[in-house]
Amino acid sequence: MKILFLTQYFPPEVGAPQNRIYELAKLLVKRGHEVTVLTGMPNYPAYEIFDGYKGKIIHKEEMEGIKVVRTWLYVTKNTGFIPRLMNYFSFTFSSVLLGSFLVGRQDIVITESPPLFLGASGYILSKLKRAKFIFNVSDLWPESAVKLGVLKNQLLIRLSTWLEEFSYRKSQLITGQTQGIIDDIERRGYKHTFLLTNGTDTKFFTPENRSEELRKEWNISDKFAVVYAGIIGIAQGLDIILEAADLLKENRKIQFLLIGEGPEKKRLMEKADKMGLTNISFIPLQEKKKMPKIIASMDATIVPLKRLELFKGALPSKMFEALASELPIILAVEGEAQRLIERSGGGICVEPENAKEVAEAVLKLANHPDFAKQLGKNGRQFVKEYYDREVIVKRLEEKLIDLVKRGV
């Protein structure tokens, strides 16, 4: 099959959607399919075009057998509402206007949302290329943006809701990252759904990647290192980590690390400084290829989200990488993620936004290393059985082949 992924975000950017689409594309190539990714010039999360891509309208490259076609988009560090819309709409238009000439005939067009506006682009491209239109929902938008307070303009909310429904109606298949997303879509009457969960490469993320040299470099050789690695944004509610660090600041053997970039990082760094926290380190965004070593070199990880009804259907991708690395998880998320961790036996579940429970869980793991080790072993066994990406891609491939054969 000829498969086109339409996504605004793709490596060398780092992040959950970037990693997931890259791994899916790579494994589909490995299974003999011709895969093209139509994406923007890399700029996330610093909102600055990466070196090697600056000043370009079009850029073509190949990554592990994947044909990557990049088109221009408007980029600014201004995080205001209008600049963000300009960023989204610029790629929405360039992906169609330029991509329609740069991308050949396709059998499948898989469109990533958010940004939701790409639904229109994906549909147009699928018609131009006479391909099946698949709409992949990794976050329910505009619902999530409204509940987080990011989207308040009523006209734009109505427009976004119309576009969401349009994308569902016009797609031959709607894929969703979690059962919660699938359930929400099906409640609206759309039954042509397929659960395409996050997962991980269990050969890439392993406990054998642990590096004492890295621990020494980061001054955690003699510490119980608790990491959060990912986007430092609003949804994660990362104040909980600072508050837990404050509760444990007298314990010199515990160190918290926040790795990554995002809109909340500056505020959190200033807050940690005002609180006088020396037991928390802010580490810059790291290259994707370094992450297996970094994750495996930690002693535990915290995976938090704000306490919102919306997030009860979330499955943060960072959970799977930690589980595969035998890293015990402290999960501060309700709902689907909580049920997964409880099934896996790979971590401790605490109440979202409850710093006291996070601190108690950290102490329990730090003081009982055999318990922490067993959680890690449980987690890796579970993720190998249910969330290995090769298993997930095989199921997706079967669904796509069936769609193409049936011609619906």
Image: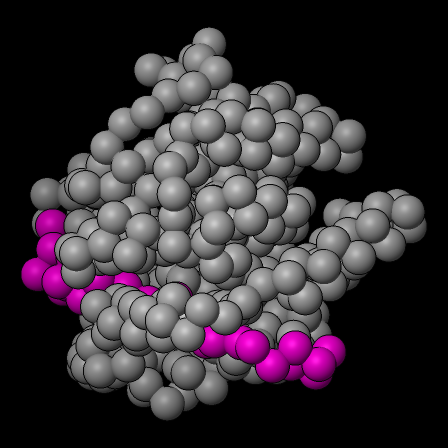
Res. 1 image quadrant: bottom left
Q: Position of residue 296 (x, y in %)?
A: 20, 58
Q: Is residue 340 left or right of residue 296?
A: right
Q: Residue at x 73, y 63 (%)?
A: 165
Residue at the top extreme of this rendering: 55
Q: Quadrant of residue 369?
A: bottom left
Q: Which residues are magenta?
A: 186-211
Q: Main secondary structure of the magenta part?
A: loop
Residue shown at the point (46%, 9%) measured from the top left: 55
Along the viewing direction, whichever of 158 and 98 lies nearer the viewer? 98
Residue 90 appears in the picture as rendered: yes
Residue 165 in the image: above or below residue 193:
above
Direction bottom: furthest residue: 343
The one of 47 and 351 positioned closer to us in this rendering: 47
Query: Does 43 appear above or below 159?
Result: above
Above-or-below relation of 34 to 335: above
Instruction: Residue at 39%, 48% (x, y): give it.
Output: 106
